[in-house]
Image (spheres, rainbow, N blue to C red):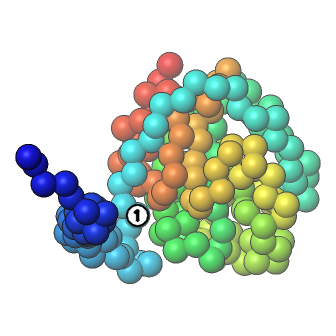
Amino acid sequence: MAKRSSPWDDRRFAVMITLGVFLIGAAILIPLAAGTGRASSSPPADVLPGAARVPAPDLRLTSLTGEPAALTDYLGRVVLVNNWATWCPPCRAEMPELLAYYQAHAEQGFVLIAINAGESEAEVRAFADAFGLTFPVWLDPEMRALTAFQNPNLPNSYVIDRDGIVRLAWTGPVTRATLEQYVTPLLER
């Protein structure tokens, strides 16, 4: 006759399995986490966009120049919406990359709209001046863009095609190389 296990043996077995799973997970995650630390002056990590195919939200805000602005104002152009904040290190790191791409492709019908998440006009203006931003900057004190795109993480970016359809989406900093690879083909259509 087989010996029945006691409740104590069952609990000890469950604890051993749980501990084993935890140790395996830690062995995998700790080296990955150790390799992700970057100084804020480093170029952004290469984050690949995900494909999307949904209509752009009907987003209406105010530009840094004080004018009303809406995404629908840009139908017929390829638009990259970038949600960011001045206090966000990856946002700061990607701004020169975004600016360089914008300057290289503005003549092709490309526009970049930088939507600031929740900061004052003075803070945003100082940042835009310090970075020499030449693309449209919108103020979003109530963070409506984060709600409209259903993504509270910063930075996040969305590429909207000439017909007003979101085609690409990603969370995290963007490099110019990634923009060239994924956005430039949309400009050539």
Quarter assignment of residue 119: bottom right
Q: How many marks?
A: 1
* Residue at (60, 59) in percent of width and height: 153
Q: Would residue 42 appear left or right of 151 to someone viewing this image?
A: left
Q: Classify 102 as above or below 125.
A: above
Q: Classify 180 as above or below 134.
A: above
In the rendering, at what x and y percent does residue 16 appear? 22, 67
In the rendering, at what x and y percent does residue 165 appear? 65, 25
Please state which of residues 152 and 155 is positioned toward the viewer in this rendering: 152
Please state which of residues 147 and 61 is positioned toward the viewer in this rendering: 147
In the rendering, at what x and y percent does residue 94 appear? 49, 62
Please state which of residues 16 and 25 is positioned toward the viewer in this rendering: 16
Please state which of residues 4 and 135 is positioned toward the viewer in this rendering: 4
Q: How crowded is mark 1: few (under 14 residues within 10 Å), some or many (20 or more)?
A: many
Q: Name the residue under label 1.
A: 44
Residue type pointed to by label 1: Pro
Quarter assignment of residue 162: top right
* Residue at (65, 73) in percent of width and height: 86
In the rendering, at what x and y percent does residue 4 appear? 19, 54
Answer yes or no: is residue 45 visible: yes
* Residue at (45, 54) in percent of width and height: 174
Tell which residue pokes out farthest to the front in this image: 1
Quarter assignment of residue 14: bottom left
Q: Would residue 98 appear left or right of 114 to someone viewing this image?
A: left
- Element under label 1? loop
* Residue at (45, 41) in percent of width and height: 49
Answer yes or no: is residue 15 visible: no
